[in-house]
Image (cartoon, grey):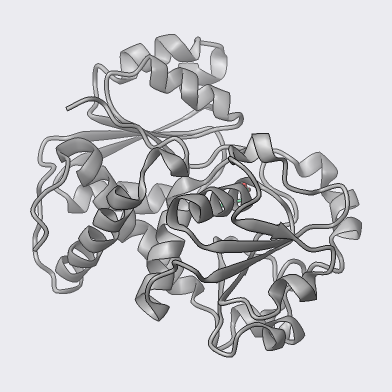
Amino acid sequence: MAIKHFLQFKDLNREELDYLFERTRWIKQQFKSYQQYWPLTDRTLVMIFEKASTRTRLSFEAGMQQLGGSAIYLNTRDSQLGRGEPVEDAAQVISRMSDIVMIRTFEQEIIERFAANSRVPVVNGLTNEYHPCQILADIYTYIEHRGPIQGKTVAWIGDSNNVCNTWLQAAEVLDFNVHVSTPPGYQVELERAGLYGHAHYEEFSDPMEAARGADLVTTDVWTSMGFEAENEERMIDFADWQVDADMMKVAATDAVFMHCLPAHRGEEVAAEVIDGPQSVVWDEAENRLHTQKALMEYLLLGKVDLK
Ligand code: CP
Ligand code: NVA
């Protein structure tokens, strides 16, 4: 089987995604019923972190162990990666000693260079541009709660960041719509988002209009990792882009609220929303585990018979 990477959402097509969502359901069910499932015995996942993480590290590490394999954590502080070893050399070495690699880093270009020199599948655990594993979990969560996402409308309120870009790519692959509202000066950049065009998204200057009638309302921090120097300015620029109860009221009556977490209550989301009845954020976080187990199984073993 040719090596398959997951560097951005559109690396998987609709048919592969449908398979993964089906597979996730079964893998989650096994986990919930304490059934041992070890298809990746003796396989090793290397996780490289150049930025902080709670969910991504935990879900990949626990997920690999639950599939019978093991996981090794590397960061830039105490590996040669932080001392200028070329990413191409690191990829050659790391991929000779492991079966799959997950990387959280800064520019997308870094992970692409790593993948180009890797003998094993590489998974994007967040870059400045994308967070594909997050949207895999988010869409699975939507399906669990509300059914197919095709034709639905997602409202993205806030920064046009890595998570936003990934929603936009997912909309193209899976055929749904995204209403995006960002403050002036923070709009989506088509090329950076890796989009083909505007067919699946619409921009709104007023966040309330973006949320109107939406089936899913979502947001993320105003300042992403790596952009901390802009924090003070962003607090001012984003002040009117908070998802609050009034905004949820104009969305569809059965709309769900999602946030990739970590969240800042009182900034991008009001406590009454994230802690309220429409919020599915804890299921969303848990589903990182189940969807990534299905992803790792697929990248290493290909499709297995659906049960
Ligand atoms: N959502 C997410 O990726 O969380 P972490 O930064 O904790 O990994
Ligand atoms: N957009 C956020 C997501 C964190 C999971 C960041 O990049 O910091």
Q: Is residue 78 visible?
A: no
| Above or below 13: residue 118 | above
Screen quadrant of the N terminus: top left
| Above or below 144: residue 180 | above
Question: Could you tell whether 80 is left or right of 298 in the image?
Answer: right
Q: Is residue 24 visible?
A: yes
Q: Determine the residue positioned at 16% across, 35% down.
A: 43
The percent position of residue 141, horizontal first and vertical second, equals 41, 69
Foreground pick, 163 / 282: 163
The percent position of residue 153, horizontal first and vertical second, equals 57, 70
Question: Could you tell whether 5 is left or right of 299 in the image?
Answer: right
Q: Determine the residue positioned at 21% across, 40% down.
A: 70
Q: Determine the residue positioned at 20% across, 72% down.
A: 32
The percent position of residue 103, horizontal first and vertical second, equals 44, 34
Q: Determine the residue positioned at 8% across, 54% down.
A: 305
Foreground pick, 265 / 255: 255
Residue 289, image quadrant:
bottom left
| Above or below 133: residue 179 | below
Residue 298, image quadrant:
top left
The percent position of residue 121, horizontal first and vertical second, equals 30, 30
Count of numbered circles on the image = 0
